[in-house]
Image (tube, rainbow, N blue to C red):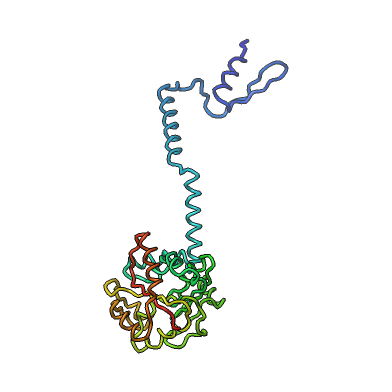
Amino acid sequence: MWDYTGLFLLLLHHNPLCFSSYQNGKLGFSGCKGPIMMSRRPINPSRRLADNGAALLEGSIRSKTRPPPYLTIGLIIVGAFLLVGYFYRGTGTFASIKGAISRVEGDFSCNVEVQKVIPFLKKAYGDSMHKVLHVGPDTCSVVAKLLEQEDTQAWGIEPYDVEDEGHFCKKLVHKGIVRVADIKFPLPYRAKSFSLVIVSDALDYLSPKYLNRTLPELARVSSDGLLIFTGYPRHHKAKNTDKSRFGGLAKLRSSTWWIRYFVQTSLEENEVAIKKFEQTASKKSYVPSCQIFHLRSYR
């Protein structure tokens, strides 16, 4: 009688669907499911090598295309800064960026110039910079920059509205640091309430009739000086947005016109402040993009 043990083991090796039993030291066979494969197709060694090479190449490509972790972290940080800038776009820093963009588009603002020369003004005016009032549109950005300076208190007057301004600007209005007021009428301050008054982008929109009211009023509330920033006639491009917001297009005048007007209103130029400012600015190779007038306050 044949010993089927070796045959059964061979069947189980080639077809796992075969069933067997082992009783009383003898191996029994109960049958197979599916076809019995007595031999396997020989594997081509070159195919196995090719498959392994393809897997290695795919893994290498994946490892190279996977972004490094520090790149992901950097993108998250940039996104966080953009979100902060969106919610606090009324602050000094982001307002300066906004102003620079406006300048590129042709809508130049002297408010940007004011923020740029604040270090020069500190040198030229010294202690007179401790209590400053800024008057002009987008005053929140200038006030924010002034408040960053050491030993400087700052307030602002917005001649128009702050509906389109950010949360930070509205917070300054709520605290009373910035006021919305029509500068064609008397200012809500006592005489000599501020050591220095800075005006930018506000007088350009006033006719001589209203200038006769506003300029003496600005000089009245200052004690140590009045600083005026106006645009050059050749630098400004009038826009319909200017007319809709300010009630008319800017009336940009030459330096000769302004000097003659200052004489008519009994306002004198501050020669000492002019000299100090120009000396400090020349060391930094500063070239003004706006006309800057340093005036004495009324005595």
Q: Which residue: 39% across, 75% down?
A: 270
Q: Which residue: 29% across, 71% down?
A: 235
Residue situated furthest left in the rendering: 234
Q: Please state which of residues 53 and 176 is positioned toward the viewer in this rendering.
A: 176
Q: Please state which of residues 213 and 50 is positioned toward the viewer in this rendering.
A: 213
Question: Looking at the figure, which quarter contains the C terminus?
Answer: bottom left
Residue 197's image quarter?
bottom left
Could you tell me residue 157's position as x and y percent?
A: 47, 79
Residue 250 versus residue 273 in the image, above or below: below
Q: Is residue 233 left or right of residue 191?
A: left
Residue 34 versus residue 140 in the image, above or below: above
Question: Looking at the figure, which quarter contains the N terminus?
Answer: top right
Q: Which residue: 63% across, 21% down?
A: 29
Q: Which residue: 41% across, 75% down?
A: 227
Q: Is residue 172 left or right of residue 105?
A: right
Residue 5 versus residue 117 in the image, above or below: above
User: In this figure, what is the number of numbered marks?
Assistant: 0
Could you tell me residue 223's position as x and y percent?
A: 48, 79
Could you tell me residue 30's position as x and y percent?
A: 63, 24
